[in-house]
Image (cartoon, rainbow, N blue to C red):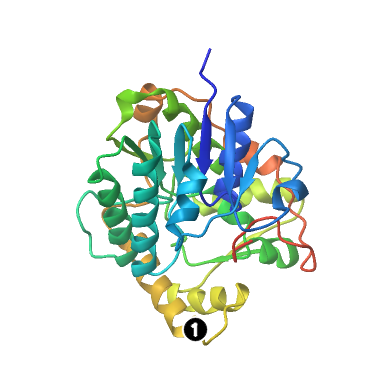
Amino acid sequence: MRNRRTVTVFGASGRMGQAQVRELIRAGHRPRAVTRSVGLFDRLGIFDADVVAADYADLDSLQRAVSGADAIFYSPASVDRDSALRQSEHVIAAAQSSGAGVVVLNSKMWAPDRPCGEPRYDLVLEIENLFAGAGLPVVTFRPVLFMDNLLTRFAKPALALEGVYRYCQRPDMRADWMSMDDLAKFMVAALDRPDLHGKRICLGGPQTLGIDEILAVLSRVMGKPLRYEYVTPYEFGLLAHAALGYDERDRPKAVSAAFFDSFYSFNNNSPHQPFRVDVASVLREIPISMETFEEWAERQDWTFDPSAEPLAGSRAG
């Protein structure tokens, strides 16, 4: 029987963090959910997590969050480069003082083994290298593309209200979509796998799907015809800026547009194929049961109420 662990989960209020907390509970562990969203887990009906507050800028609060933990789950926040590196350095310092048996690093996306010239991916690699050089027992997962992205304000409102998937992914590009719940399964499995320490593992789903196949499934599940509307990465950045309600003074539209223009132009055209991975070889090493896109889609709520309180602690919602 697997040992019961106390696991500190950073970023617990986001979709990925919530999935990690749920899976830890399901596996019989004790999640310590780090969030400043007071009452979120009560509203989600998750009562078996120890909810604690911490601030990435406050090392003392981070040390309290990891004190006595057997393991740490860390997913870097989607912030600017300097902030992301500084936050990661503080988490590393806290982890070094904690004596945790393993840090499971969720890079949240594909990462290159060497700098590739795309700033966001190169930042992910920098963060991975910080952990690798810190003398900590670290297992790193690099999930390539999430089914759950379709539930965010980037996609779900238009799907539910207009019957449109409006995005900047090249229409003919196929990808290995995976669920955040399956990522959580891999992270929990790593708790009992010291043989994985030091490894960086790319993850994808059990199917390689095109957007036409994604929309065929969603059309059936949602009970209405859906269509894809491609917009350029730059245009999508402008749409995302408005959808997420950024203040122009805090994050100018031009910054959002430039980010998506660079990031998705790379995704659409790079020979690296950042949305593809051979998951079969990973499953031979870490055998878990993964869900298909249809199985995932059938258990989601595809209604959208713009006045409803978000149940994810991020702007994407």
Q: Position of residue 18 (x, y in %)?
A: 61, 45
Q: Which residue is mark 1?
A: 253
Pinpoint residue 58: horizontal percent, then vertical percent.
Answer: 46, 61
The local secondary structure at tag 1 comes to helix
User: Does residue 198 appear left or right of residue 166 in this picture?
Assistant: left
Q: Residue 272: image x %, image y %?
A: 27, 52
Counting every numbered tag in the picture gives 1
The residue shown at (34%, 28%) is 281
> Is 160 on the left-hand or right-hand side of 194?
right
Q: Nearer the viewer, residue 122 or 103?
A: 103
Q: Is residue 209 visible?
A: no
Q: What is the three-letter code of the residue carrying label 1?
A: Lys
Residue 87 higher or lower than 187, as above or below: below
Q: Nearer the viewer, residue 240 or 40?
A: 40
Q: Residues within 10 Å of mark 1 (few under 14, many from 20)?
A: some
Nearer the observer, 44 or 265 = 44
In the rendered view, would you say 244 is above or below 39?
below
Identify which residue is drawn at 59% across, 31% down: 30
User: Which residue corresponds to the image point at 41% horizontal and 26% vertical from the top-left?
Assistant: 283
Indicate the quadrant containing the C terminus: top left, top right, bottom left or bottom right.
Answer: bottom right
**Residue 234's spot in the image, x, y percent?**
44, 77
Residue 191 in view (yes/no) = yes
Image quarter of residue 202 = top left
| Nearer to me, 199 or 87 | 87
